[in-house]
Image (cartoon, rainbow, N blue to C red):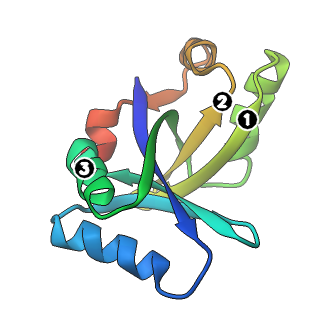
């Protein structure tokens, strides 16, 4: 039920993000969702893509530092309180959210929130027990 996310370490200077996206374009990789976090010297580009292995290889072959991280994708109604309903459950269970980002599905009815939990297995179990929809990687890669 986990999703593989690619993290790309980028030097924080003009053109570096463009270089990474060019490599993905040339490898015919479709980005499903992304997040960029930055500091003064570097940034972390976090990506969910349609072909994790091909993207990983293309980026590494072009000199980028890349790692893969398991994350959890959870579908919630796109309305006020959607995120809170998840936070309430995981907080009660003592599960920490290290970071998250989200996107809205094509239908516009639901949002998908990508979570990096400190204990993803426990988080998946707790979410499923509380009737949340945890989306497997195979479905996220196809969006």
Front residue of this view, candidates 133 and 50: 50
Q: Residue at x 76, y 22 (%)?
A: 95
Which residue position is annotated with label 2?
Answer: 117
Q: Height in image: 103 above or below 139?
A: below
Cα–Cα gap, marks 2 and 3 = 26 Å
Mark 1 or mark 3, which has the lower sequence index?
A: 3
Which residue position is annotated with label 1?
Answer: 97
Classed neighbour count for the residue bearing mark 2: other residues with Cα under 10 Å, few (<14), some (14–19), many (≥20): many
Q: Position of residue 11 (x, y in %)?
A: 57, 71
Discs 2, 1 touching: Cβ within 8 Å: yes
Q: Height in image: 11 above or below 89?
A: below
Q: Residue at x 26, y 35 (%)?
A: 138
Which residue position is annotated with label 3?
Answer: 57
Q: Position of residue 111 (x, y in %)?
A: 52, 52
Cα–Cα gap, marks 1 and 3 = 29 Å
Mark 2 or mark 1, which has the lower sequence index?
A: 1
- Residue 89 relative to residue 59: left or right: right
- Residue 129 relative to residue 133: left or right: right
| Secondary structure state at the residue bearing disc 3 | helix
In this rendering, does residue 106 appear at all? no
């Amino acid at each position: 039920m986990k999703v593989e996310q690619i993290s790309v370490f980028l030097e924080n200077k003009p053109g570096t993000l463009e270089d990474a996206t060019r490599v993905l374009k040339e490898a015919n990789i479709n980005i499903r969702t992304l997040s960029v976090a930055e500091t003064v010297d570097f940034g972390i580009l976090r990506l969910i893509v349609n072909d994790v292995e091909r993207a990983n290889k293309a980026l590494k072959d072009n000199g980028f530092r890349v790692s893969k991280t398991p994350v959890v994708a959870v579908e919630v109604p796109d309305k006020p309180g959607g995120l809170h309903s998840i936070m309430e459950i995981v907080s009660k269970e003592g599960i920490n959210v290290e970071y998250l980002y989200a996107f809205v599905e094509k239908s516009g009815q639901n949002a998908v929130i990508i979570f990096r939990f400190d204990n993803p297995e426990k988080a998946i179990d707790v979410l499923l027990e509380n009737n949340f929809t945890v989306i497997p990687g195979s479905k996220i890669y196809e969006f």
